[in-house]
Image: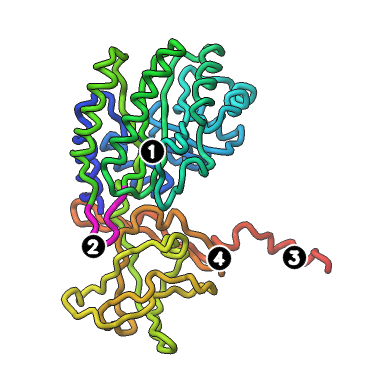
């Protein structure tokens, strides 16, 4: 839904308009489609990339230079090389990557480091406890890392953290900004360096359940503004640009997985089988995540069918919902699974040789355009050398 995506993007920017250098880097991993990225570029968003193909996607829509932040982990040299070629901000995940980056591609003028606050900051259900996460520098490593970068001639610095995913408590992000603002002051004082920006990461959640409430972006923006005035301006520090890298909250609520009822089954419980499966949306199977389900034309019908809504993979966790109350359905009915606009198609795979679906975009003028075709059998077999089978002896 292009109109809804644009309106939401503008609301996010407006909430932080008090900061002249505010920048949102769209987390490409959430919905890696160049058509969506082009729309978001038009709204002033950059790209948060974590792999070589994501860098190429950004380049394809003209998002280059410091409009990209490259936040990766366990990173091969060729990915760093591409990021540096594009002029992206490289966000290092580990202190050992400083020397690795210098040896393999050279240190850029601007470097950012990812901070893992460990027990100083609580995580949440998806990311878990920060001290058990594989990401980022410890506090002690952060001071040592910036010292090394300073001594190696790096002139420009940023600071980043990302410690939550799908978080609905807006105060969490205010606390995160507080953590970084305070740390900027300490690093600046001890090392004699100045920071250009802090990136508070993404992780803003969306209301998957009907009873959930969306994060109050305006309240988050105002809360961070107050802290900025106290900890940055009030302490006499150089003005900072505020950066974010949201993905889910940018596109998630505005995408839908549309399927049809293929079969109904009644054994020890009732099952409604769809022509989609976890290849198309794996979050319920992977996280036990809730996605709201509706049946077009039956919005006012009683929810008197309690069933598991399933796909067709040879995996018993291939279920979009378990013991969910939905309207009575017939074979052929459309079923809409909501909030599939992020980490939906992007997390797809090809187990059981299942093929991923097309992606359609509802334009602002009401036109519907295909922005990704459905996969074909030929796509699935493209990496197999069938022509060599005859010469393969067994």
Give the residue at x 39% y 44%: 164
**What is the x, y in percent for residue 281?**
42, 62
Give the residue at x 32% y 53%: 252
Whether the magenta-drawn stretch holds residue 272 is answered as no
Residue at numbered disc 1: 61
Most extreme residue toward the left, as rendered?
300
Residue at numbered disc 2: 210
Q: Is residue 8 left or right of residue 178?
A: left
**Mark 1 burial class by Cα count in 10 Å: few <14, some 14-19, many 20+:** some
Q: Secondary structure at mark 1?
A: loop
**What is the x, y in percent for residue 303?**
23, 79
- From the image, state whether disc 4 or disc 3 is nearer to you: 4
Instruction: Pick whichever of labels 2 and 4 is earlier in the sequence.
Output: 2
Residue at numbered disc 3: 389
Q: Quadrant of the N terminus?
A: bottom left
Mark 2 near mark 4, Cβ–Cβ under 8 Å? no
Marks 1 and 4, how far apart at CA: 31 Å
Most extreme residue toward the bottom, as rendered?
267
Question: Between 276 and 390, which is closer to the camera in this rendering?
Answer: 276
Instruction: Pick whichever of labels 4 and 3 is earlier in the sequence.
Output: 4
Marks 1 and 2, how far apart at CA: 35 Å
- From the image, state whether disc 1 or disc 4 is nearer to you: 4
Q: Secondary structure at mark 4?
A: helix
Residue at numbered disc 4: 351
Instruction: Pick whichever of labels 1 and 4 is earlier in the sequence.
Output: 1
Mark 4 near mark 3, Cβ–Cβ under 8 Å? no
Marks 4 and 3, how far apart at CA: 23 Å
- From the image, state whether disc 1 or disc 2 is nearer to you: 2
């Amino acid at each position: 839904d292009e109109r809804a995506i644009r309106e939401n993007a503008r609301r996010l920017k407006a909430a932080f308009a008090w900061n002249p250098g505010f920048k949102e880097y769209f987390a490409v991993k959430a919905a890696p489609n160049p058509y969506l990225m082009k729309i978001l570029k038009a709204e002033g968003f950059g790209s948060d990339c974590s792999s070589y193909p994501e860098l190429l996607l950004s380049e394809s829509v003209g998002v280059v230079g410091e409009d990209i932040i490259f936040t990766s982990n366990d990173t091969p040299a060729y990915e760093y090389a591409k990021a540096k070629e594009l002029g992206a901000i490289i966000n290092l995940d580990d202190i050992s990557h400083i020397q690795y980056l210098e040896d393999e591609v050279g240190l850029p003028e601007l470097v950012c480091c990812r901070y893992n606050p460990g027990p100083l900051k609580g995580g949440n259900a998806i990311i878990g406890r920060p001290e058990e996460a594989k990401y980022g520098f410890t506090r002690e490593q952060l001071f040592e890392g910036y010292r090394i970068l300073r001594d190696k001639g790096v002139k420009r610095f940023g600071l980043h953290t990302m410690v939550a995913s799908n978080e609905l408590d807006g105060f969490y992000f205010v606390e995160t900004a507080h953590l970084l603002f305070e740390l900027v002051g300490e690093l600046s004082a001890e090392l004699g360096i100045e920071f250009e920006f802090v990136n508070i990461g993404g992780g803003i959640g969306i209301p998957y359940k009907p009873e959930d409430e969306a994060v109050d972006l305006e309240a988050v923006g105002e809360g961070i503004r107050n802290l900025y005035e106290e900890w940055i301006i009030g302490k006499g520090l150089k003005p900072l640009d505020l950066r974010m890298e949201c993905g889910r909250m940018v596109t998630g609520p505005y995408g839908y997985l549309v399927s049809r009822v293929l079969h109904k089954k009644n054994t020890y419980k009732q099952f409604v089988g769809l022509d989609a499966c976890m290849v198309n949306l794996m979050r319920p199977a992977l996280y036990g995540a809730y996605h709201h389900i509706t049946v077009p034309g039956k919005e006012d019908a009683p929810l008197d069918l309690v069933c598991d809504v399933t796909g067709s993979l040879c995996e018993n966790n291939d279920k979009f919902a378990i013991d969910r109350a939905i309207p009575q359905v017939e074979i052929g009915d459309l079923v809409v699974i909501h909030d599939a606009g992020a980490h939906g198609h992007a997390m797809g795979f090809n187990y059981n040789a299942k093929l991923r679906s097309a992606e359609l975009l509802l334009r602002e003028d009401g036109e519907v355009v295909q922005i990704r075709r459905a996969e074909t059998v030929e796509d699935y077999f493209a990496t197999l050398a069938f022509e060599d089978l005859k010469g393969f002896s067994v």
